[in-house]
Amino acid sequence: MPRVRALSIHADYRCRSSGACCRSGWEIPVEPVVEARIQAGMDEGRLRPAASWARALPGLPHEARSVLRVLGSGDCVFLEHGEPRLCAVERQLGADAMPSSCRQFPRLVTLTPLGVSVTLSHYCPTAAAMLFRDDAALAVVSDPPAFPPAWPYEGLDAREALPPLLRPGVLMDWPSLERFEQHAVSLLAGDGLSPERGLRLLAQAAEAARRWTPERGSFGAFLEGVLESTGRELQTRAAIVDRETSLLEITEAWRLAAACVPGRERCAPLPDGLDAADTRFVAPVWPALGKPIRNWLATKAFASWIALQGEGLRTTVLGLGVALGVLRAEAARACAEAGRVLDAARLKEAVRRADLLLVHLADPETLARRLGRCESAAQPFTIRPSSAEERR
């Protein structure tokens, strides 16, 4: 059985039937074996959806020929009424009869030669709530109860791929990737450290690590020295106040992510007055909500697809910076809509919207490619203003 790693705040996750994933209007591919099981359930009278249950759609993965039909309300045709709102397929036929996308959600998985790493999409309200918990110190844990080794994990499969890039043309090794992940999580777990400060320390470590050459010995030992240096700097300089993330950086981060969405009409535009909303409703209380924000950033640093698909450590860290900008933009949107200051409830909604954009709407390969431009930039961790074409 493979070793499974996850974050401590996710270690006891279980579905609580919020139904958000079943009411989002997503087109879920139905694999042939699942199609056969559902049809058998229909023939036996165990499933009685209110409408025809499948819609043919070409070009689907895994030899699927159709998607689950979505009602005008956005509900999946198999979502039952009542409380809790359950999936009829799972209740009547079992989890094995569900499409793969339904079984896996909200798990986000990377598979490497060292094992399986699992984080969660916080578009799921249950997962989003776990960012605010106080009963689990943020850390990387192995073989947590929520994610058993025997689960049929699907995700970004790099088990037969080369290790990720340190910088263009230079490979890292798999243990070093895990060590950098662990360092990022440990850094973001520190109380009294702003999310912005944590990212800047992580960026410094990435920049130092990418200076490695074979003449300096093994990369693993070199990286360890870099991370120890970052730890010493954290102890001596953590109290220094960083500059605020600029409103331009926030909006440009959101636009960069939105530009990676196929069919931009699926992505709600940034509202007018975002700058004023951030200044009035978000900026004054943003530091007080640092812990759940850092927890969320850690879920982006761990089991990161960008780390595997990108061009190097710069790309990985810039991806975290873009994620933070997207979250802040969505926080300003939520506060502007409510006309009220940011609090835990509105931050949770902002987290859900941020993950909807970053995880479910943006194409991951396109996002990694766009972020990878930083590898040759003079100011690698700066989000440059988007072009007129990217704004459309």
Image: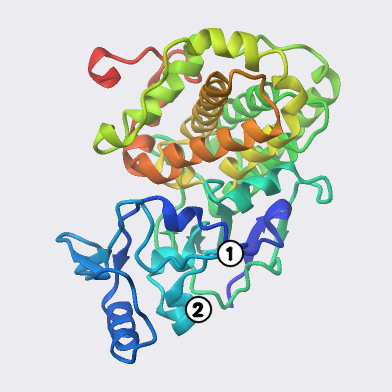
Tell me what residue is drawn at x 42 percent, y 12 percent: 272
Most distant residue in the bottom direction:
44
**Labels 2 and 1 touching (C-beta < 8 A):** no
- The residue to which callout 2 is attached is 91
Q: Nearer the viewer, residue 161 or 74?
A: 74
Position in image of residue 100 (x %, y %): 40, 69
- Give SS at disc 2: helix
Tell me what residue is drawn at x 31 percent, y 28 percent: 259
Position in image of residue 72 (x %, y %): 30, 52
Disc 2 residue type?
Arg
**The C terminus lies in quadrant:** top left
Mark 1 Cα-neighbour bin, 10 Å: few <14, some 14–19, many ≥20: few
Position in image of residue 62 (x %, y %): 27, 68
Compute the Cα span from label 2 to label 1: 14 Å
Q: Which mark is residue 113?
A: none
Vertical placement of residue 379 versus 149, above or below = above
Disc 1 residue type?
Glu
Q: Nearer the viewer, residue 323 or 178?
A: 323
Mark 2 Cα-neighbour bin, 10 Å: few <14, some 14–19, many ≥20: few
In the picture, measured across the screen, residue 321 lies left or right of residue 158, that is right
In the picture, measured across the screen, residue 246 lies left or right of residue 92, that is right
Visible residue check, residue 144: yes
- Give SS at disc 1: loop
Tell me what residue is drawn at x 50 percent, y 17 percent: 250
Tell me what residue is drawn at x 57 percent, y 52 percent: 120
Q: Nearer the viewer, residue 15 or 115?
A: 15
Visible residue check, residue 94: no
Position in image of residue 162 (x %, y %): 41, 54
Q: Report the colour scheme.
A: rainbow
- The residue to which callout 1 is attached is 83
Q: Quadrant of residue 5?
A: bottom right
**The N terminus lies in quadrant:** bottom right
